[in-house]
Image (spheres, rainbow, N blue to C red):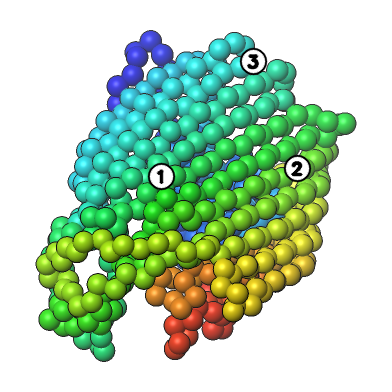
Amino acid sequence: MLATPALAQRAGENAATQSSDAFGRSVGSERTGLYNNEDVRGFNPVDAGNVRLEGLYFDQVERISSRIIDGNTIRVGAAALRYPFPAPTGLVDYNLTQPGKDASYSFNAEYSSTSSIGPGGSFEFKQPLSDTFGISGGVGFRNATRYEGGHSRFRPLGLTAAWRPQQGTEVLLFGGLFIYRTDELRPFYYPVGTEPPPKAERGLDLSQPWASRSQDLWTSGAIVKTPLLGAKLEAGLFYSAKDQHSVYADLMRGVAADGSVANRRIIAERDNYDGSWSGEVRLVKEWIGSTVNHRLIASVRGRSRNRDFGGGSVLALGPSTILARDLRAEPVWTQGAKNRDEVRQITGGVSWSMVSPQRFSLDVGVSKSRYRKALDFADPALADPITRDNPLLLNVAGSVHVARGLSVYAGYTRGQEEALVAPDIATNRSEAPPALRTSQVEAGARWAVTPRLTFIAGAFSIKKPYYNLDPALRYRQLGELPTGASKCR
C-alpha cells in the first residue's frame, strides 16, 4: 500500500483488535471471526433480508461497492444482546466509509493467485473540507481469470459526504456502483444416473464467449441522526438495485462418466431488474440510573421492492462435452415480455432494554409487520398469485452475571425472512417464494478469562421452512429445516 507520508491512512485498520467477540468482524480488507456477511450459522443474512446499514434497516438486493463500506459486524448469539430487533439466523450490520478530521489517501495494488488469478487495486481518500463537512470515496478494479476458466472484470466506485453541524448530529449522503463486465458464464453439470462425471481439467474454459454477464449494482441513500425532544432521531432511506443488461444460464444435462453431454441448453435473458427502496425511522430514548440503565426504541421500517424477470429464450445446443471447449455461434433470439414481482412491507416495533452493569441485562422487542407480495406473470394462462402475511415478530433475551467475569445468557427470537429464488434448473426458474417465518432459541455462557480474552460457549436451535426441487423440478416448500448446534468461541 502506498500513501502520502504526511497524511494519516488506513494502517490502523485491524479486524482482530477492533473485535469484541469471535462471531464476525470486517474492517477494510481484514476479516476475523466465525461468520461473515454471506454465512451466519449456515444461512446467508443478505439473502434472508437481515441487513442493517449504520444500525438501520436496509433491504440489500446485491453486492455493495466496497468503496463506500468500511466493514461490517455480525450480530448473532451473545453479540446480539442489546441490539434492537435481532433476527433468528443473525444480522449483518454494515459501516459506511466516512471522512474524519484528518485527510488520508491510499493506493492499493495486488495480484491474486487464489481462486481468481489476476491484478487488482484501488484508490481511496478521506478529505475534510471544513470543520463540519467532508467527503470520502474511491475507485477500484479487478481483472480476474478464474481457476475453472473464464474471465471477470469488476469496477467498484463510490462517494460519501458527511455533514456534522453540531455535537450529536450528522447527515450522511452516499452512492456506490459495482460494475460487472465480460463475466463469462460457468456451465452447470447435471450427471446422468449415479455415475460421477470425469475429473475436470483445471483452467478449462467451457463457456461460450457470447454468454457473459453484464450488470450494474447500485447502492445509495441518506442517513440522519440528531437529538429530538429529549430523545435521538435516527432515520435512513436507501436504494439498492441490480440492473442486468445480459444474463445467461448454461445447463449441461445428462453428463455421462465419459464426459459426454446429452443435452446442452443456454437460457438467455436481457434487461432483468431488481430494485428496492427501504429504510427506517426510529426514536431512541435512554435513561441512565445509578444502578440500572434503560433504553426504549420506537421504530418504523419498510421496503418497496420491484423485480422484472423471465421472458428469455431457451437456446438448444444439442449434444456436447465437458472434456474440451465446444464453441458455438450465438443463435438469434429475442427477449420476451417480463414477469413482475412486487413486495410491499411495513413493520412497526418497540424495543426495550434494561442493563445493570456487572449484574444482569434484559432485552425485549415486539414488532407487527404487514407484508404483501404480488406476482404478475406475462403469460396470461398463468394465475397471478398475491400473498399477504401479518406476522407478530418478537425477541426476548437476557444475561446474568453469576461470578466475577462469568455470565450466562439465553434468548428467543421469532422473525420473517426472504426465501431464495428458484434455481436455473427449476420449471419455475427465478420465481421467488413468499417470505418465511423463522424462530430460534439459544443459551450460552461467556467467561472473560482476561481483559483481552473471552471464552463463549453456546447452543442454539433454528427452525426455518425448507425449499427445494420436487420430483417435477418445481421449486417449492418441501418441509421444515430444523438446525441446532453448539459452539465454543
> Which residue sits at x=39%, y=54%?
246
Give, as a three-letter code, the residue at label 2.
Answer: Val
Determine the CA span between mark 3 and mark 2: 24 Å
> Which residue sits at x=39%, y=75%?
425
Q: In which quarter of the image is the N terminus?
A: top left
> Which residue sits at x=40%, y=19%?
105
N-terminal of the pair, mark 3 or mark 1, is 1
Query: Residue 333 lies in what quarter of the image?
Result: bottom left
For the question of whether residue 116 can be seen, the reply is yes
Farthest residue in the right direction? Answer: 229
Identify the residue under disc 1.
31
Identify the residue under disc 3.
132
N-terminal of the pair, mark 2 or mark 1, is 1
Q: In this view, does 140 lie above or below 196?
A: above
Rendered location of residue 409, percent (x, y): 65, 60
Rendered location of residue 215, percent (x, y): 41, 48
Nearer the observer: mark 2 or 1; the answer is 2
For the question of whether residue 34 can be seen, the reply is no
Q: In this view, does 192 lie to the left or right of 224?
A: left
Identify the residue under disc 2.
281
Rendered location of residue 363, percent (x, y): 74, 55
> Which residue sits at x=17%, y=71%?
322
Query: Residue 394 lies in what quarter of the image?
Result: bottom right
The label on residue 166 is none
N-terminal of the pair, mark 3 or mark 2, is 3
Give, as a three-letter code, the residue at label 1.
Answer: Arg
Determine the CA span between mark 2 and mark 1: 30 Å
Circle 2 SS class: strand
Rendered location of residue 181, percent (x, y): 33, 45
Nearer the observer: mark 3 or 1; the answer is 3
Structural crowding at the residue carrying mark 2, measured as other residues with C-alpha within 10 Å and reported as few (<14), some (14–19) or many (≥20): many
